[in-house]
Amino acid sequence: MHVQTLSLKHFRNYSETCIPLFPGINVFVGENGSGKTNLLEALVLLSLAKSPRGGGDKSWVAWGEHEATVRGWVNGKSTLQTLTLTYIHGSKQAFANEMRIERLMDFVGLLKIVLFVPEDLQIVGGSPRFRRRLLDTLIGQLKPLYLYHLNRYNKLLVRRNQLLKQPQTSSELERLLDGWDDLLSESAAYIIAARKSFIMHLKTYGEKAYGTLSQNKETLSLMYRAEGLPELQEASVPPDPLVERAFLQQLKEQLRQVFYQRRELDRQQGHTTVGPHRDDLLFFLNGRPADVVASQGQKRSIALAIKLAEVETIVQESGEVPLVLLDDVFSELDDERSGMLVQLVKKSEQSFITTASFQYLGKLKDASVYTVTRGRVRRVE
């Protein structure tokens, strides 16, 4: 899978441009603020239907404009597909081969990617929300139903939190909370089961990649921490828990009970204190918490190993090789880890790299190089 052409209209600092792209490594070189990261953002939008930067959909519309369009011509296994995402009249619209896709979750993952940005190097010691986002981004590209339950869960969570803030309790309020807890636990069970399942893939490939990086001197292990369900941390899951109804039903009932048991504490706190929105992905080096014992170099090796594992997971689950997008990360790595990063991009049929300097191009032989200057892109022949 690779993108043949990327077309932008009123997107960020691009008025209107059409960029031919090539299989293999594509490198965008430009000063900070030139627009090179915007090109990666456009590719992410074609994959995830949302920007990795946050800030709302309106933020990627060029200043003074009211609509924007990102379009990519994607060469798959045997067909050429056109993917389009527009922001118009205050909302997003997605198209595949010019046909409107009503549900964005059915658009997500048609183009599969692995994104590596400097913030990912802090994945071990940073906020748990970064690690949850890593899992959500990976699974969402492969399981549309996961996105359905994730969106549903977040909406239900908002409503439950509103009820928890009611100044007085009553039997009617308790019945309402019972109903919301039942719905919430259903989606929470699916989310947790999916995360546990995919962590097994990340564990297999990530531990192997880290062993290579450390010359097998250290061992990496991963664990999913489900808040309020300590027994689930060490528990195994069925080979495919998402189709095991008995497992999902049992997990749903456990979560429903935990939501009920935490209700009084949640009232005191004013929000729901347990559930997938509070869970975490934990890393261990030689059996000890990596966020405590790992050096900065080791933490960066873990981040790199996990990105390698993401690529392998997508290949195994979908049979498709994802695009690899690297946003100015070479400058953050030493020579050894840069070498492993080169191996990462070589695993992909197509990769995109941004950098502010030509000095890293020696590591990227046979790359297609583009200069980016104030929203203008030119290929270096």
Image (tube, grey):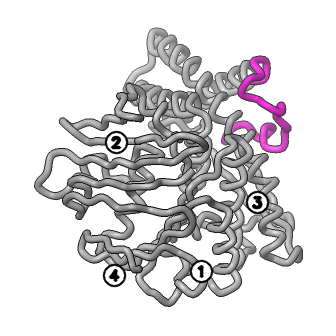
Q: Are marks 4 and 2 in contact (CB under 8 Å)?
A: no
Residue 107's spot in the image, x, y percent? 46, 35
Identify the residue under disc 1: 365
Q: Secondary structure at mark 4?
A: loop
Q: Give the Cα separation between the discs numbered 1 and 4.
A: 22 Å
Instruction: Characterize the local packing of mark 3: few (<14), some (14-19) or many (20 or more) Cα atoms within 10 angstroms.
Output: many
Q: Residue furthest bottom?
A: 359
Kindly identify which numbered label has been placed on residue 285.
none
Q: Nearer the viewer, mark 1 or mark 4?
A: 1
Q: Secondary structure at mark 2?
A: strand
Identify the residue under disc 2: 85
Query: Which residue type does callout 2 highlight?
Result: Leu
From the viewer's side, name the closer residue of 364 and 66. 364
Magenta stretch bounds: 227-247
Kindly identify which numbered label has been placed on residue 206.
3
Q: Give the Cα separation between the discs numbered 3 and 1.
A: 26 Å
Q: Residue at x 54, y 56 (%)?
A: 130
Q: Residue at x 57, y 56 (%)?
A: 114
Q: Nearer the viewer, mark 4 or mark 3?
A: 4
Look at the picture and state if 354 lies above or below 282.
below
Q: Nearer the viewer, mark 3 or mark 1?
A: 1
From the viewer's side, name the closer residue of 169 and 363. 363
Instruction: Characterize the local packing of mark 1: few (<14), some (14-19) or many (20 or more) Cα atoms within 10 angstroms.
Output: few
Query: Which residue type does callout 1 highlight?
Result: Lys
Query: Which residue type does callout 3 highlight?
Result: Gly
Identify the residue under disc 4: 31
